[in-house]
Image: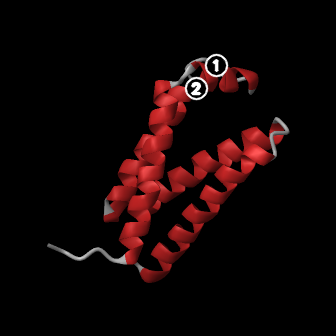
């Protein structure tokens, strides 16, 4: 069995996060639907978000597509943070900003090490 390096483990942890977040959006509870409605998004928007999160997760799993996955994951987190900031939900924006920083740190490190 091939030994996993720390950068691969980092990417897989990010992928798990996006699988969980994507699943929560795809299942779109009443509370999730209410949040999206409050932010002015259409009823189908959580499903789009969940699909993009799942796509990012899948791309993060495979070494050849990790930078693309990180770019997609970062884009989703920018949109999430932007939505929350524009709706004055500053405390809630901390989580997507934190994940964005983690994704950016991964992408920079991945690009620097050429993996």
Specify whether 89 is left or right of 106.
right
Q: Is residue 86 above or below residue 4?
A: above
Q: Residue furthest left?
A: 1
**Nearest the camera: 104 or 20?**
20
Q: Are marks 1 and 2 in contact (CB under 8 Å)?
A: yes
Q: Quadrant of residue 23?
A: top left
x then y, percent, for residue 56: 44, 49
Rendered residue at 42%/54% (across/down): 15
Which quadrant does the N terminus fall into?
A: bottom left
Q: Is residue 103 above or below residue 89?
A: below
Q: Is residue 11 above or below residue 5?
A: above
Callout 1: 10 Å neighbours few (<14), some, many (20+)? few
Residue where numbered disc 1 is placed: 42
Residue where numbered disc 2 is placed: 45
Q: CA distance from mark 1 to mark 2?
A: 6 Å
Rendered residue at 69%/55% (across/down): 97
Specify whether 41 is left or right of 17.
right
Which quadrant does the C terminus fall into?
A: bottom left
Q: Quadrant of residue 86?
A: top right
């Amino acid at each position: 069995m091939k030994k996993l390096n720390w950068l691969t483990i980092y990417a897989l942890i990010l992928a798990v996060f996006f699988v969980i977040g994507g699943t929560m959006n795809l299942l779109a509870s009443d509370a999730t639907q209410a949040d999206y409605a409050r932010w002015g998004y259409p009823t189908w928007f959580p499903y789009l978000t969940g699909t993009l999160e799942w796509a990012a997760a899948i791309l993060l799993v495979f070494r050849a597509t990790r930078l693309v996955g990180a770019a997609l994951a970062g884009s989703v987190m920018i949109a999430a943070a932007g939505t929350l900031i524009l709706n004055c939900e500053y405390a809630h924006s901390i989580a997507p900003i934190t994940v964005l920083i983690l994704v950016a740190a991964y992408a920079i490190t991945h690009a620097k090490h050429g993996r």
